[in-house]
Image (spheres, rainbow, N blue to C red):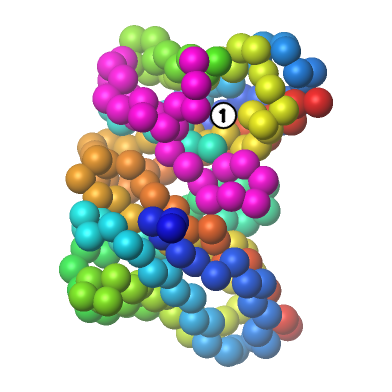
Amino acid sequence: EAGVTQFPSHSVIEKGQTVTLRCDPISGHDNLYWYRRVMGKEIKFLLHFVKESKQDESGMPNNRFLAERTGGTYSTLKVQPAELEDSGVYFCASSLRVYNEQFFGPGTRLTVL
Amino acid sequence: QKEVEQDPGPLSVPEGAIVSLNCTYSNSAFQYFMWYRQYSRKGPELLMYTYSSGNKEDGRFTAQVDKSSKYISLFIRDSQPSDSATYLCAMIGNDYKLSFGAGTTVTVRA
């Protein structure tokens, strides 16, 4: 069974540009989560999808971040325009049900110059 | 004050030693407790998942939860160089989202 996959693995962009991160959860997992780790800080929750609906987006830093989940399958996280403080590692996780184990992808390392 | 406190280390031990890791938390709503292992450039991988106070063993790993003290621990017996990684504690309350500690970097010397 394929795990959670994320693309790209690394992205380097200039401040003000747009970047889109993609996450493919484990097949059949209705719950999809985005997390972020910025340098020197803990991994922080960004948002939670149940199928295609946003269940909780309380962790999204500001309106420059837009997450979508098409048809309840893969998800994208767009940052527009990117700022220096957006640099970090963005993780996606999925679970069959809430309170079940969350399986993490390898992360996308975003560097904003 | 952070919801979850974890000493980032680093921690270096000789092969075969017992590794002891711990976290404290302040949110009484946390009810599920996890330990994740993360290798460099990889995503976190779940090691242990506990709910109630007490001990849970899985091979060389033992997780302890003390809800009255808001304190959790992970012990790794007979540590191996392959155990060298960052270990993250994480907790879930009523809102389904994981709250992580900072992670402790562990090196097991051969």
Q: Does residue A24 appear left or right of residue B54 in this picture?
A: right
Q: Which residues are magenta?
A: A37-63
Q: Does residue B53 appear left or right of residue B14 in this picture?
A: left
**Does the magenta run of residues contain A35?**
no
Q: Which residue is mark 1?
A: A6
The image quarter in which residue A98 lies:
top left
The image quarter in which residue A89 lies:
top right
Q: Position of residue B98 (x, y in %)?
A: 37, 47
Q: Does residue A46 appear left or right of residue B12 in this picture?
A: left
Q: Pick the residue in front: A56 or A90.
A: A56
Reply above or below: A67 against A99.
Answer: above
Q: Does residue A54 appear left or right of residue B89 in this picture?
A: left
Chain letter belonging to callout 1: A
Q: Position of residue B90 (x, y in %)?
A: 39, 56
Q: Pick the residue in front: A37 or A98.
A: A37
Amino acid residing under circle 1: Gln
Q: Pick the residue in front: A110 or A63.
A: A63
Reply above or below: B83 against A10.
Answer: below
Quarter of the image where the C terminus of chain B is located: bottom right
Q: Position of residue A85 (x, y in %)?
A: 67, 31
